[in-house]
Image (cartoon, grey):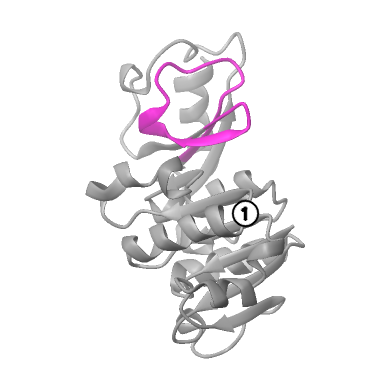
Amino acid sequence: MRIVVVGAGTLGTQVAGALAAGGNAVTLVEADGPRGTGGSVLAGVELVVGDACEVSVLEAAGALRADVLVAVTGRDEDNLVVALLAKRRFQVPQVVARVNDPDNHWLFGEHWGVDVAVSAAATMISLIEEATRSVATVDLMRLRQAGLELLETSLTAESRAVNRRLEELDLPQGLIVTTVIRRGAPMPATEAGRLEVGDQLLLLSSTAGDAGEAEVQAVFQG
């Protein structure tokens, strides 16, 4: 897939690197160069220097041929403008945008060209991988250094969590549901409502190894 990532901060370079590792053709756009890489260019990632809020810069980055555009700058206004240009001017099929200020989350919708809006950095790569159907394995070193593990569980007809809301479940301390993927579409866990058969849940756990997996099994599968 052809993917344009706007914003070369720490998060943007991590996203670009993970998607490139999955065999995607990735272009990274940054107004001041690749800040997150200390001036170097990521392996397998093309760099375009310029303001992505300008049509000419997005065109130079290949937006006309892009399957996905990911806007992850530190400014919500820039992410919204880039998303709108990507969808309306370049007809990019899938647009993912980062929300920095939770108060602005309501803006990040179809009217601004956003297909998937995400705010938590810890879930960003998982959401983007699902949105782009990338098969890349994400480097979870940062999570492990923080004492966290990313876990996944899928709900079947026998799962005890089906037809229940997340707030109705007795989640142990240190276990957080970050994302629910329903019929191929990722969404923040807070918007999932009642869980359904076939839902895939992405969780962060502070309990490592088999113990963390056992907690997830106990809560969601029974």
Is residue 202 magenta-colored? yes
Judge left or right: residue 41 versus residue 44: left
Residue 34 in the image, given as x and y percentages of width and height: 51, 83
Relative to 162, is 67 above or below? below
Relative to 178, is 26 above or below? below
Image point (59%, 9%), residue name: 158
| Farthest residue, direction right | 23
Q: Nearer the viewer, residue 221 or 23?
A: 23
Label 1: which secondary element: loop
Examine the image and state in which quarter residue 194 appears.
top left
Relative to 19, is 150 above or below? above
| Farthest residue, direction left | 103
Residue 99 visible, this orientation: yes
Residue 205 visible, this orientation: no
Q: Amino acid at mark 1?
A: Val
Residue 180 in the image, given as x and y percentages of width and height: 50, 32
Residue 221 in the image, given as x and y percentages of width and height: 53, 18
Relative to 122, is 27 above or below? below
Image point (52%, 83%), residue name: 37
Judge left or right: residue 66 versus residue 140: right
Please give the range of residues in magenta: 181-203
Image quarter of the N terminus: bottom right
Q: Nearer the viewer, residue 222 or 72?
A: 72
Residue at mark 1: 92
Image point (62%, 15%), residue name: 156
Is residue 77 magenta-colored? no
